[in-house]
């Protein structure tokens, strides 16, 4: 177990420096998020947790953030995310190619149930793996006139699980 942790941390350092590339697909990496995560916004730990689960015979990963749900799934070679937002709309986002190692940036490509072009909706979601127990999450909102960003830090609550398992 200790050897695995040391190996994973070395892998993260090497991928962050660009020395090696991960052989895991982004989808497999998101499967490795499975479990519960504490959510911090600035210096405040939120009363809700982030939960990741694999489902549908391993073909999806769900992310439960309070009452919001996001589903990650493959479409050919692409990794897609559908976000079921509290605003009542459902942006569909695609993982951008050629991002930095350990950074997963999803960009909206279409949306359902948007009330108007200037209604609030998620435009972009960025996950940055800091280490095997910490992920920085940024959610970029668009209201048709401007963008604003929400930033969170996720900390794994399941000590036996690690990103990359």
Image (spheres, rainbow, N blue to C red):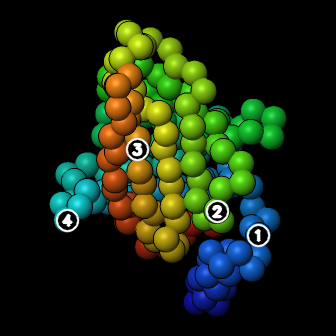
First in sequence: mark 2 or mark 1? 1
First in sequence: mark 1 or mark 4? 1
Disc 4 secondary structure class: loop
First in sequence: mark 3 or mark 2? 2
Residue positioned 74% across, 67% down in the render:
22
Q: Is residue 59 visible?
A: no
For residue 43, the mark is 4
Cβ atoms at labels 2 and 1 below 8 Å apart: no
Disc 2 secondary structure class: loop
Q: Nearer the viewer, residue 137 or 99?
A: 99
Decide: few, some or many residues near mark 1? Use Cα within 10 Å; few <14, some 14-19, many ≥20. Answer: some
Question: What residue did someone put label 3 on?
Answer: 139
Decide: few, some or many residues near mark 3? Use Cα within 10 Å; few <14, some 14-19, many ≥20. Answer: some
Q: Is residue 116 above or below residue 88?
A: above
Residue 56 appears left or right of 140: right
Q: Nearer the viewer, residue 30 or 120?
A: 120
Disc 3 versus disc 1: distance between alpha carbons? 26 Å
Question: What residue did someone put label 2 on?
Answer: 100
First in sequence: mark 3 or mark 1? 1
Q: Nearer the viewer, residue 63 or 95?
A: 95
For residue 8, the mark is none
Q: Is residue 139 above or below residue 23?
A: above
Q: Quadrant of the N terminus?
A: bottom right
Cβ atoms at labels 3 and 2 below 8 Å apart: no
Decide: few, some or many residues near mark 4? Use Cα within 10 Å; few <14, some 14-19, many ≥20. Answer: few
First in sequence: mark 3 or mark 4? 4
- In the displayed orientation, state which residue is furthest to the front: 145
First in sequence: mark 2 or mark 4? 4
How many marks on residues?
A: 4
Residue 94: x and y in percent read 63, 36
């Amino acid at each position: 177990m200790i050897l695995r942790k040391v190996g994973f941390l070395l892998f993260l350092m090497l991928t962050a420096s660009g020395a090696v590339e991960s052989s895991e697909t982004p989808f497999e990496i998101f499967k490795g998020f499975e479990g519960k995560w504490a959510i911090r916004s600035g210096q405040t730990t939120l009363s809700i947790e982030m939960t990741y689960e694999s489902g549908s015979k391993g073909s999806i990963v769900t992310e439960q953030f309070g009452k919001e749900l996001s589903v990650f799934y493959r479409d050919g070679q692409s990794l897609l995310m559908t976000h079921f937002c509290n605003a009542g709309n459902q942006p569909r986002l695609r993982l951008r190619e050629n991002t930095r190692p350990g950074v997963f940036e999803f960009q909206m490509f279409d949306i359902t149930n948007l009330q108007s072009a200037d209604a609030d909706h998620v435009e972009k979601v960025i996950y940055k793996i800091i280490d095997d127990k910490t992920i920085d999450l940024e959610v970029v909102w668009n209201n048709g006139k401007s963008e604003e960003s929400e930033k969170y830090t996720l900390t794994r609550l399941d000590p036996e699980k690690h990103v990359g398992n």
